[in-house]
Every structure is written in structure tokens, then in C-alpha cells.
Amino acid sequence: MTDRKLYLGPLTDNRRWDMVKLRADDVIVVTPPKSGTTWMQTIVALLLSGDPEVETELAVKMPWVDIRFREMSEVAARLEDMTHRRCIKSHTPIDGVPLHDQAQYICVFRHPLDAHFSYRRHLRNIPISSFDMWYPDNDTDGITFRRFLDGGPEGFDGDAMPLAHILRHYQAAQAVAERPNVALFHYADMTRDLAGSFERVAALLDVSHSADLLEQLIETARFENMKANAARYAPGGGTGFMKSDTEFFHSGSSGKWREILTDAELAAYDAMMDAHLKPEERAWLEYGSTGMASG
């Protein structure tokens, strides 16, 4: 841990990475929660296998190292026993993840407000009460959004995913973005051009498929298909962990917060974003390569 920032929360502990022996061909997907993690892992699984019917089983085959729910010795042993090319997940900012000179790091981001409201729904869909004080069922006083703006990037706050944690993810990724094995993707770009995102990921992984097969893989990864087959594609799908596997994929749309947040709340969000990011940085974090809302 001497060369990495420490991130400890009620759900996660990035010291667990100390037990993972990284390989040169590993693929590490590093994202804030609800920013396209499962989508990107599915794309990687499809491209590495070349099989539209591949059983992704993300929680087992592409484990989330940071989470405390599983004994790390078991996770590490399972990863070590894998003979195929591995994909590993992390919700720790990349400055808390070990950086291998050759392993590929894929960082995915989403408009912070879309990620926040998606996380609200996600917490209501899983049997974890740790964040009830941050995300109360009946939030008539706007506590949840105030804590989203006020929370810090680490510790308990970090696992509750306040804006500061998302910004830490983004700024940490930007700091290493010039490395040839680090790539930044945006949920909005994946939504606008899934085929282009597939092509970019395939180039990063140095894999290629025929045009016909690639089209099948792309169709498999479309939101509508993944939601229709939620038990197959949701993390832990089919195990009963979530109240509803389908709800994990809720809608995939963006911008619903415009109908929910007050002018004062939006102004407070704007002030924090502008205080931490340059205009072009903010534009990309919110809307991807176009730097503006679509539709």
C-alpha cells in the first residue's frame, strides 16, 4: 500500500488488492458505482470470449476485489486459478488501485447526477442498511442531496458515493490518463455509439472478430437485451441477492434529475463542480465527448 492512497469504508477496503498478483494481460475496470461498470464488464467479456452467449457471471468470474463481503483469500485464490484472460472490477479511485505497467485499465464515468440518482434506486434494491441515514426512504427534507454535496471522498462517505468521491475518481484517472494502458470512457458516449465503444475496447484489448460476429456481440450488450435477461447480466443475478435483477437496469436513461432537483440544489451542485473542475473537464464528466446534453 505504500504507493497507493488508502480507501476504507463499511463496504470496501482497497488493501485487499495487496493479495492480488496482477498479470500483464489483466483488464481492470475502475469506475464510481452506477456509472457503467456492469455494461463495460459485459463488453469486455463478450470481446474476450467472442461468444454472444457467454455466461458472464460477473460477481464470480470478474470479481469486485474491494468489497468486504467475500473472504479475500478466497477471491485471490480464485483469481490465481484462472487460466483465461482476467477482468477485475474496482470502485476505488485509480490512485488506490495497484498500477501495473502492462495491464489495461478502463475507467468509466457518467454524469454525476445520473449516477447519484441511479445509486439511490440501487440501494433500495439491495439488502444493505448501512446507508439508510444517507439515503432515507422518506426524504422530504432533501437530506440525501445535501449529503451528496457535503460528503468527503473517503471512508464512510466515500462508500456512500458523494460528489467528492466521483470527483476524486475523475481527477485520479485524469492524472494517469497519458499512460498507454489507461483509457477513459463515458456512459453517454457508450449510449450514443455502442458500436464505436466496442471498436475502441477491442483495440485496447488487441482482439478482433468478423463484422458479423461483432454485430452479434454489440446487439447482446444493448441495454434492452441486458435488462430483458437481467438474471444473466446483473451482478449476482439469479441468486436472490437483489430484490429485483431487472430493477438493477432500471431505465438506462439520463437527465431525470432535472424534474426532481430544485433550483437551489442545482445551483449548489453547479458551484461545487465549477470550484473543482475546469469548464472543459466538467463538460466531459457530465456529457462525454460531445460536452453537451443530447436530445
Image: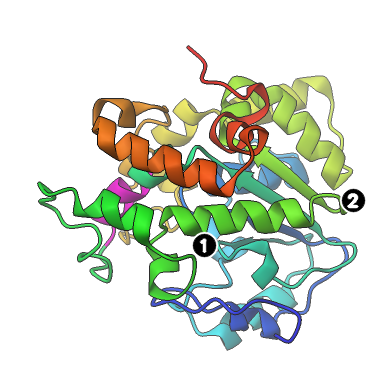
Measuring from the top left, give residue 66's x and y in whole percent.
55, 73
Mark 2: few/some/many CA within 10 Å (<14, 14-19, 20+): few
Q: Is residue 265 visible?
A: yes
Q: What main secondary structure does the magenta stretch of the protein show?
A: helix
Secondary element at tag 1: helix
Q: Earlier in the sequence, mark 2 or mark 1?
A: 1
Residue 96 x %, y % = 65, 72
Residue ID at (27%, 30%): 263
Residue on which the image places disc 1: 59
**Image position of 102 (left or right of 261):** right
Quick check: is 258 in the magenta stretch? no
**Residue 244 in view in this figure:** no
Q: Which residues are magenta?
A: 118-126
- The x and y percentages for residue 190 are 62, 30
Residue type marked 1: Ala
Confirm whether the magenta stretch covers residue 123: yes
With 223 as the anchor, is 278 left or right in this view?
right
Which SS class for mark 2?
loop
Query: In which quadrant will I find the N terminus?
Result: bottom right
Numbered circle sitting on residue 180? 2
Left or right side of 16 for 48: right
Q: Given the image, on which type of amino acid does mark 2 rest?
A: Pro
The answer to whether 193 is drawn above or below residue 129 in the figure is above
In the rendered image, the vertical position of residue 57 relative to residue 83, given as above or below: above
